[in-house]
Image (tube, coloured by chain):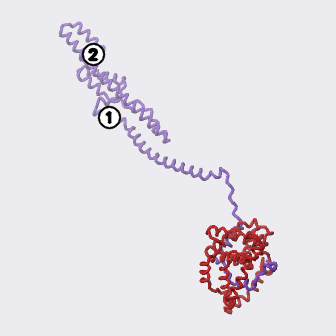
Amino acid sequence: MTEPKRPDDARDALLSAAHAAGRESPPATLDAAVLAAARQAVAPQAVAPKSRPALRRWAPPVALAASLVMGLAFLLAQQVQQDPVAIEESFATEAAAPAQPEVRRDHPAPADLPAAPVRDLERAREAEAPAMAAGMSAAAPAMIATPPAPVADLGSPAEPAYAAPQLERATAARAQAQAARAAESQRARSEADELAEMAADDAEDIAAWLKEIQALRDAGKQAEAVEQLMAFCEAYPGHKECPEP
Amino acid sequence: MERLHATVAALPAAVAFAYPRGVPYASDSDEDLMQAYARGDEAAFEVLYGRHKARLYNYLKRELGRDAVRADDLFQAVWLRLIDARARYRADARFSAWLYRIAHNLLMDEFRRLKRAPLADSDEVLDTVADIAPGPADAALAAGQAAALRVALDALPPEQRQVFLLREDAELSLEEIATLTAVGVETVKSRWRYAVKRLRAALAEEKAS
């Protein structure tokens, strides 16, 4: 810049030269820093990314969450798929259940006797009628020892579900079958107990009735004894005390 | 050495080859360069910086009592503030006056922060006298006049030194110095005269010795 010359602010040439000679320059690092800042200030700024719409903004986290959920579901499904082995084993055990009565026949236990329909009991009575004629004492144990009808004979409602391919249906069917089986078992156990009591009562009744007939005979009341015997034979037609029809 | 001379001699030819129309911005004024930089021309800033960096650095360092670290920090701060304010620059103001206004304001902030007057006290002056040693440029001058001037300058009252430095380094007029320092023009003239008188006496004494 050209400096206007004024008489009152005239610069001394000697002083100016001495002062200029003593000037120090800034370090090169300062030069570099300042020039870099100047360049950076006027450098074209990178265009700031516009705010993305909400759908695009939320797409990555939603996709991540969905992937996690699917992965967890897949892992859970794989873990549950190991259960069908256990289910099949239990199914196999249940399928083998009809063979168990054979074993139970060898070791009869009145409390464990499964359900026996009334018609089976009557059939057993008919079959044992000759035995009753042979001896009253053996009748009751024979009735108790009548093999019960297997559960499979009654028809399990859960059996068709064994082959259900879907896991959930199999699990639900299994639970339902177990519940039904437990209820059936309970019912059969109570019926067996009832039948056993009934058989014991019948045996006592038969014995008491025959004892009463014998007492009438001993008392010389033959007519009454015959009348009682006929009534007895109507009640127990196959009994050994009764005459052959 | 001969290679150095040959290289220096070949410089004008190299410059002429690289810039057939002359070195860019060489004839531009400071104000034009600053406006060009404000428009995004970083090369204009480099030229402008090259013109003023030594004077500004010298001014700050003298005002800060030769504290090189503070002078460096303040020097950088001045240029950064200028860079930030480039869009507000108006060509009707002289660039050097604008630059040294920024420097002066930052200097006053620094003095307030240091809680001291912009005066190197007598002890500091004595210390700086002991530290001064003639540099390569000083050797080119007669009998270490530059070093003598430094000592005499440090010994000046701060107001007189400030006027002298703004006059010599910033090349401001006395009116501009008066505006910058917020004192009357006559006061600035008085300080300038006293400063020049003392410095001349110091140089004369150095010359005599």
Snapshot quadrant of residue A86: top left
Chain purple in the figure, letter: A
The residue at the far bottom in this view is: B2
Q: Position of residue B18 (x, y in %)?
A: 76, 81
Name the kind of residue labelled 2 in the image.
Glu
| Percent x, y of residue A234 | 30, 13
Q: Is residue A193 left or right of residue B160?
A: left
- Amino acid type, callout 1: Glu
Judging depth in this view, the residue of B84 and A236 nearest the camera is B84
Tint applied to chain B in the drawing: red
Q: Position of residue A111 (x, y in %)?
A: 30, 29
In the image, residue B23 sits, relative to residue A79, either above or below, namely below
Image point (75%, 65%), residue name: B88
Q: Nearer the viewer, mark 2 or mark 1?
A: 1
Q: Residues within 10 Å of mark 2 (few under 14, many from 20)?
A: few
| A96 relative position to A9: left or right | left
User: Horizontally, is B170 left or right of A212 in the view?
Assistant: right
Between residues A130 and A162, which one lies in front from this camera angle?
A162
Query: Dot 1 corresponds to which residue?
Result: A102
Per the image, the residue denoted by label 2 is: A244
**Left or right of A10, for residue A40:** left
Can marks 2 and 1 be said to lie on one chain?
A: yes
Q: Is residue B43 above or below residue A75?
A: below
> Could you tell me how far apart the alpha carbons at marks 2 and 1 are, in whole angstroms?
34 Å
Mark 2: which secondary structure?
loop
Measured as percent of width and height from the top left, residue B39 is found at: 76, 68
Chain ID of residue with mark 1: A
In the image shown, does B41 or A179 lie closer to the viewer? B41
Given residues B87 and A218, the one toward you in this image is: B87
Q: Quadrant of residue A40?
A: bottom right
Q: Quadrant of the N terminus of chain A?
A: bottom right
Q: Chain of mark 2?
A: A
